[in-house]
Amino acid sequence: MTGAKTFPPGFLWGAATSAYQIEGSPLADGAGPSNWHQFSHNPGNITHNDHGDLACDHYHRYAEDVELMREMGLKAYRFSIAWNRIFPEGRGTLNTKGLDFYRRLLDRLTDAGIQPNVTLHHWDLPLALADQGGWTHRDSAHWFADYAHAIFRELGGQVRQWATLNEPWVIAHEGYVQGTHPPGLRELPKARLATHNLLRGHGLAVQAFRADGGEGEIGLVVNLEPKYAATEHSEDQSAVARMHAWMNRQYLDPVFLGHYPEELAHIHGRDFTDFPEGDYSLIQTPIDFLGINYYSRSVVTSAPGLLPFHADRVRQMQSPHTAMDWEVFPEGLTSCLLWVKRRYGEIPLYITENGGAFDDPAPIKGRVADPDRVAYFREHLLAAQAAIAAGVNLKGYFAWSLLDNFEWAFGYSKRFGLIQVDYASQTRTLKDSALFYRRVIESHGAELWR
Ligand code: FCB
């Protein structure tokens, strides 16, 4: 129904989290340490030296949290599995107690009628594997596929929707270029290796899923950000092309078209080498859906820097910004969805993350007023609907995030939750945005136009 103000029947309304950001108890029940456990305990890496030892204590409070999801009327919940709970050493002996936590969570979700959407890797890598070079080791793709295979076998009966990786660009860029995530390096050639092995691991995991006759669907989650040039100068225009290739096309071109963008040769310069031909058909193994995480756009200007493709973000003074200092730019979501359809074809899409950090007030009589977040969700859901009206096959939306949580290098200083978490008492309070989202879900979107 092109142009109609409605969401398709069966459109999935969900919210998302990830393991290290909410679970706490990172070493409980025989889990091995992860790269994020080590990184966050290393002073100076995280704002206020925060870490995930307690986080939202979801490891113990998952039942209460599923109850809150039910209260909000969520139809789906996207979460990730901590690889280091399942294989404390990354490979070898499976830790049944770690797996049992996810079984308990899945049982609760089933009872509540909430569909799970499970991500296998949302950045927390077993430290034993990180110590062997992590994603720069060519075997990492096989380590990941073996772990994925075990999970499909053990949890396949309870899960119908899988994602292999969350945002491989962030793993490579923040981990190996910016050094703000583990392993904290600034070595561009390693980013290329990590990217390639992540994508090989993704392909191998999809093949393992198919080989097992896995029921349901499997996809990949990437973060997309439209790039705009700050001026019409040719240097800024080519900075935009490089940034777009580096962040958006570097992952989707190989998965859907079987090759990396040409710009990468320029970006890597003398260090540019190619990979075995067979890798590309592996990476191109067909998937069932693509998950898109969208937060903002960036307006870039060419700037000399540490890296050959360096380009600076230019703050748009006239636009509202979130507490992350990310510009609020809903039309970028519509344009990303349309761009994916145009460039890569008719693959079913989900928005697997979208949301904003804001400085929320303390609850007053049980109410948390977060009008900026309500506006953010409203505008982005309308932007998503505009893409549907223009013919995009968008099948669902997951708000980031269910709970305030550990926002990586920013620790607990940034709050993205629909539900406020008082970390000291672990009290949860539904924010106004959660109540708004409940009305959106109940009305299957009609609330957006009220
Ligand atoms: C995304 C991550 C997610 C969260 C949001 C704000 O890049 O996937 O874990 O940190 O950003």
Image (cartoon, rainbow, N blue to C red):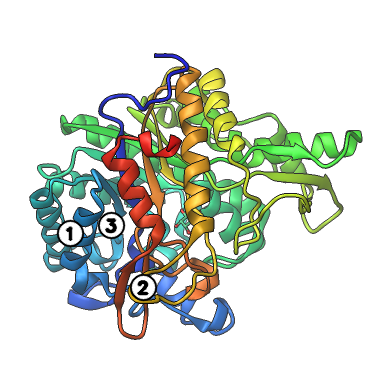
Q: Residue at x 19, y 59 (%)?
A: 66
The quarter in which the C terminus is drawn is top left
Q: Choose between 41 and 374: the one closer to the eye.
A: 374
Vertical arrangement, residue 355 with respect to residue 196, above or below: below
Whether residue 94 is visible to the viewer of this picture, yes or no, is no
Depth check, mark 2 against mark 1: the one in front is 2
Identify whether 23 is placed above or below 438. below
Q: Quadrant of residue 203?
A: top left
Quickly name the residue at label 3.
81
Mark found first going from the N terminus, 1 or 3: 3
Quadrant housing the N terminus: top left
The three-letter code of the residue at mark 3 reads: Ile
In the figure, is residue 450 to the left or right of 112?
Answer: right
**Residue at image mark 1:** 102
Residue identified by numbered label 2: 421
Q: Give the numbered dot on residue 409.
A: none
Neighbourhood count class around disc 2 (C-alpha, 10 Å): few under 14, some 14–19, many 20 upward: many
Q: Quick check: is the Cβ at mark 1 less than 8 Å away from ligand 1?
A: no
Whether the residue carrying mark 2 lies under 8 Å from ligand 1 is answered with no
Q: Residue at (18%, 46%) from the top-left corner?
A: 114
Distance, label 2 to label 3, CA atoms, is 21 Å
- For the residues labelled 1 and 3, the Cα–Cα distance comes to 8 Å
The x and y percentages for residue 43 are 55, 85
Label 2 sits on what residue type?
Val
